[in-house]
Amino acid sequence: MRVLIVKTSSMGDVLHTLPALTDAMRAIPDIKFDWVVEEGFAQIPSWHPAVDRVIPVAIRRWRKNWFGSETRQQRCDFKRVLQSRNYDIIIDAQGLVKSAALVTRVAKGEKHGMDSKTAREPFACWFFDKKHLINKKQHAVERIRELFALSLGYEKPSTQGDYAIAARFLSGKPALPENYLVFLHATTRADKHWPEERWRELIGLLASSGLKIKLPWGADHEYHRAVRLAEGFDYVEVLPKSSLEKVAEILAGAQAVVSVDTGLSHLTAALDRPNITLYGPTDPGLIGGYGQNQIALTADKTRNIGTISATEVFSALNALNI
């Protein structure tokens, strides 16, 4: 059986889809997946053993110059690749009109997705042949697992979902020579940032732990924040700019991770690493870290992430016995 997955973004949403592939792989041994995903996240599906082909799409980039000659050519090339195979089933796990119209609609095969009551954008279901009612009062991972089970005709397992990618980053690789933590300090929304003075206070509390602290970054402003956080602490390392795969290797080797609400926090969960995630305005109940050893610390009723103290995080780290 060959199945096409339409789940283009974001990083967390792409990662949340992986356990559903593992369920399907175990229920249908000969199943193979192709996956349409935004070009910036194309590495992630390739990590899963059931994925045969990754088809990058660039909707985010194309919409900046939709009718430009180069964009038109790239869209034509994408459509040609997409239609080069006939699929037994197409599963649209995105649930958005944009991706359904541009990808699911033109792919060849029976199209499945959430119905109008449960899709993120109800009109997206116009493009589906089979529409499934999915319980909304469950974690995003479980919703996608249910969608795959209903689309492919097996019973959703009652056990916790398995991302099936951690072994890729640990198997056969030598252990890194030092014990370290990773602090994921960067996120897109200002109100999701934990104040820099809190990060520095936490770093100070860890001075006698013997642990190194690694600070990854992506954009220039994130690099400058990392430099400010590390200033004066010789056990804190600002990492070089790295590929997503390299960051995953670093996360996989960490004793534990402290993070704000960001895509890399979900990657940490997918790698089965102990992870303390700090939440301010967002509710971790339905979209928070999913997996083993995932700890959510939430702000007080003001939803101001700055109300989470460094000592709270330090205590949570100590409770992990790292």
Image (cartoon, rainbow, N blue to C red):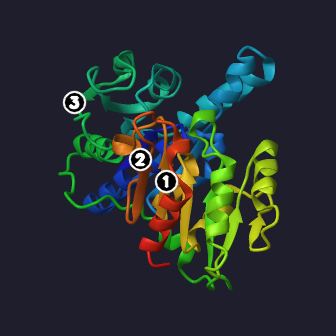
Give the x, y percent position of residue 231. 82, 61
Q: Relative to 129, is 225 above or below?
A: below
Residue 149 image label: none
Cα separation, mark 3 vs mark 2, equals 22 Å
Whole-angstrom CA distance, mark 1 to mark 2, is 8 Å
Q: Are marks 1 and 2 in contact (CB under 8 Å)?
A: yes
Residue that label 2 marks: 288
For badge 1, the amino acid type reads Thr
Q: Residue at 48% across / 59% down in the picture?
A: 312
Along the viewing direction, whichever of 282 and 62 lies nearer the viewer: 282
Vertical placement of residue 221 versus 64, above or below:
below
First of labels 1, 2 by sequence position? 1
Q: Which secondary structure lies at badge 1?
A: strand
- Front residue of 91 and 159: 159
What residue appears at the point 55 percent right and 75 percent down from the top-left corner? 255
Q: Which residue is mark 1?
A: 277
For image coordinates 49% across by 73% down, the residue present is 167
Q: Nearer the viewer, mark 3 or mark 2?
A: 2
Task: Say how many tags the image has.
Answer: 3
Q: What label sits on residue 133 in the rendered view?
A: 3
Question: 210 above or below 310?
Answer: below
Q: Is residue 274 visible?
A: no
**Residue type for callout 2:** Gly
